[in-house]
Image (tube, helix red, strand yellow):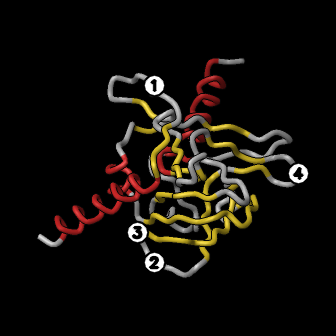
């Protein structure tokens, strides 16, 4: 392959990674993703929407801009940030279409029908309904029942994150749900107090 063709191919790959552009083929394409390591409070501060709910349905489709995305329909139990009714559609980049083609974006969570989740979401991407989870997997917690009957929030931690020195972080983290909720509410109260000044 000529040097100019290699350079062109690398440029196209970089463009795809930066803009989450995928191409249709018989196999899903993949885009790598990392994000800065964030504390829970930083995730809360960067979210334009935060909600807790149960995933009712999911469907992959091609968005109006040609990018593969997955639409999740959630029954909303609680909203920490934002407003809306008892159901919400959350559209995340990536997914596998019925014909097997698609786009896999590393670090963007895949939600399962029936799972209970807490999501921290960005603003919608201009011209689409698509959002990102804040800090990739750091913006999603699975909510499960512990063996003692208490709710537990399981987050990916910063497994898809890198610190400022470039080192990879650890794996999943589990929190008592009541403690996690109290931290979220305390951060929202602190943020509201600062905005009121």
Q: Position of residue 18 (x, y in %)?
A: 52, 42
Q: Position of residue 128 (x, y in %)?
A: 58, 67
Q: Which residue shows up at 41% across the image and 22% down it?
A: 167
- Report whether 6 appears left or right of 163: right
Q: Position of residue 119 (x, y in %)?
A: 51, 58
In this view, the residue farthest toward the left is 197
Q: Residues within 10 Å of mark 4 (few under 14, many from 20)?
A: few
Read off the residue under disc 3: 81
Q: Are marks 2 and 4 in contact (CB under 8 Å)?
A: no
Q: Are marks 1 and 2 in contact (CB under 8 Å)?
A: no
Q: Which residue shows up at 55% across the image and 47% down it?
A: 19
**Badge 4 or badge 1: first in the primary sequence:** 4
As displayed, is residue 2 above or below residue 15? Answer: above
Q: Which residue shows up at 45% across the image and 64% down it?
A: 50
Give the number of the disc on residue 83: 2
Q: Are marks 3 and 1 in contact (CB under 8 Å)?
A: no
Read off the residue under disc 1: 168
Based on the displayed image, in which of its 4 quarters is residue 166 positioned? top left
Q: Residues within 10 Å of mark 2 (few under 14, many from 20)?
A: few
């Amino acid at each position: 392959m000529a040097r100019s063709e290699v350079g062109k191919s690398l440029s196209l790959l970089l463009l795809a990674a930066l803009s989450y552009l995928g191409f249709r083929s018989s196999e899903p394409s993949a885009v790598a993703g990392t994000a800065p390591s964030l504390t829970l409070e930083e995730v809360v501060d960067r979210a334009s929407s935060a909600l807790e709910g149960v995933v009712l349905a999911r469907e992959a489709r091609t968005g109006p801009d040609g990018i593969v995305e997955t639409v999740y329909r959630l029954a909303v139990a609680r909203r920490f940030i934002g407003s809306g009714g008892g159901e919400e559609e959350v559209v995340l980049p990536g997914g596998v279409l019925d014909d097997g083609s698609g786009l896999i974006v590393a670090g963007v969570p895949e939600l399962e029908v029936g799972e209970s989740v807490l999501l921290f979401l960005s603003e919608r991407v201009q011209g689409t309904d698509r959002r990102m989870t804040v800090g990739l997997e750091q913006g999603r917690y699975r909510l499960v029942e512990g063996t003692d009957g208490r709710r537990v929030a399981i987050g990916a931690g910063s497994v898809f994150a890198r610190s400022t020195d470039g080192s990879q972080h650890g794996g999943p983290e589990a929190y008592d749900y009541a403690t996690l909720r109290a931290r979220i509410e305390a951060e929202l109260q602190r943020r509201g107090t600062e905005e009121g000044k």
